[in-house]
Image: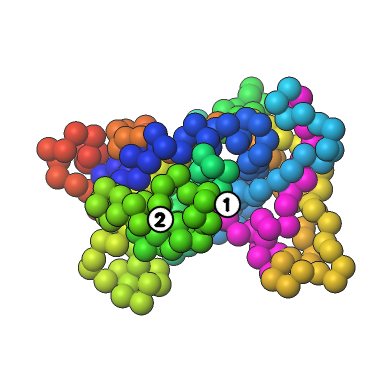
Amino acid sequence: GNDNALGSLGAMVNTQMQENVTAGATNFIVRLKADGEPETNALTLYTATPASAECDVTSATCDWQIALNSFDADCSPLILLTELVIAPDGTFTAGGPGSAFLLTFPLVTGAALAVPVQSPRVAGVAALDEGGTVVAVEGLLVGAVSKEALKAAIRKVPAELLPAPAAVIENLIDNGIRTDIDALDASGQPGKDGTNESASVALAFKATPANVVGVEAVSEPPAEGLCSAPPGSETIAPAFRVVTLGLSTSGKIGEALDVDGICVPAEVPNGCPAP
């Protein structure tokens, strides 16, 4: 069925999340690659900054520079959803079990939480022009977040930047968020152990065309753990900047996706798709 246990957090984080995107404080670049062998086709998500400090993202179309922290030490993208398939009508899917990425939740105080999302997958629609070129992208990015990882992220935020005492927030997580996904084994690694330890999450996004002109320069000597030979900007096209971003607040069709492949009872509204 459709999973979105963390949808209840939308009321607390969505306004700040969208303000950050609109103001250019948070910039995500989406790339769709579906022109090669099926195993190499993927949706990739990068962080970016305007290539020119003078460009006002709130009123102009900027050129973009991909941040080095979008890559691991081997210069592979950190957020890569494989097996991208784009149908003739523009609908697309990618990702699934076996991968993970860090998701950042902004707080109204200016701090942010970075938590690992397990088994991410995406489904959406790529708007095509008459020539078949993608001109816009929108969709849902879903996955599972363990409660322990969420609480660990809370503990890393300085107390003065939290909207409430950490103990209060952790109590809310323990008692107010339902765990509906078994995404980790007993050792905390991706897998299953028969216990639901994670909460499903669904992020809704829309993105418009973006011109990527480069990748952040590598420092000398290169920083430990960062990519030292990033790919050229020509490999990050076509690209789209996320202009609308927020947690979906329900599990209804169109606002959430199935994360674990387990269908809830058919009597639950919008739960199980028709066979």
Q: Nearer the viewer, residue 40 or 31?
A: 31
Neighbour class for label 1 at 10 Å: few (<14), some, many (≥20)?
Answer: many
The quadrant in which residue 190 appears is bottom left
Q: Where residue 109 sits in the image (x, y, percent)?
A: 54, 42
**Could you tell whether 259 is left or right of 57 in the image?**
left
Q: Can you see residue 76? A: yes
Q: Nearer the viewer, residue 34 or 144?
A: 144
Q: Secondary structure at mark 1?
A: strand
Q: Residue at x 51, y 61 (%)?
A: 156
The residue tagged 2 is 166
Q: Where residue 72 sits in the image (x, y, percent)?
A: 66, 65
Q: Nearer the viewer, residue 52 or 35?
A: 52
The quadrant in which residue 229 appears is bottom right
Neighbour class for label 2 at 10 Å: few (<14), some, many (≥20)?
Answer: some
The residue tagged 1 is 42
**Could you tell whether 258 is left or right of 28 in the image?**
left
Numbered disc total: 2
Q: Where residue 33 sits in the image (x, y, percent)?
A: 63, 47
Q: Which residue appears farthest toward the bottom when viewing the image? A: 187
Q: Which residues are magenta?
A: 60-83
Q: Residue 79: say if magenta.
A: yes
How far apart in space, not on screen, are marks 1 and 2 (Cα)?
38 Å
Q: Can you see residue 124? A: no
The quadrant in which residue 150 appears is bottom left
Q: Residue 222: say if magenta.
A: no
**Could you tell whether 157 is left or right of 143 in the image?**
right
Q: Residue at x 26, y 71 (%)?
A: 193
Q: Residue at x 51, y 39 (%)?
A: 108
Amino acid type of the residue tagged 2 in the rendering: Ala
Q: Which residue appears farthest toward the right when viewing the image? A: 220
Quadrant containing the N terminus is: top left
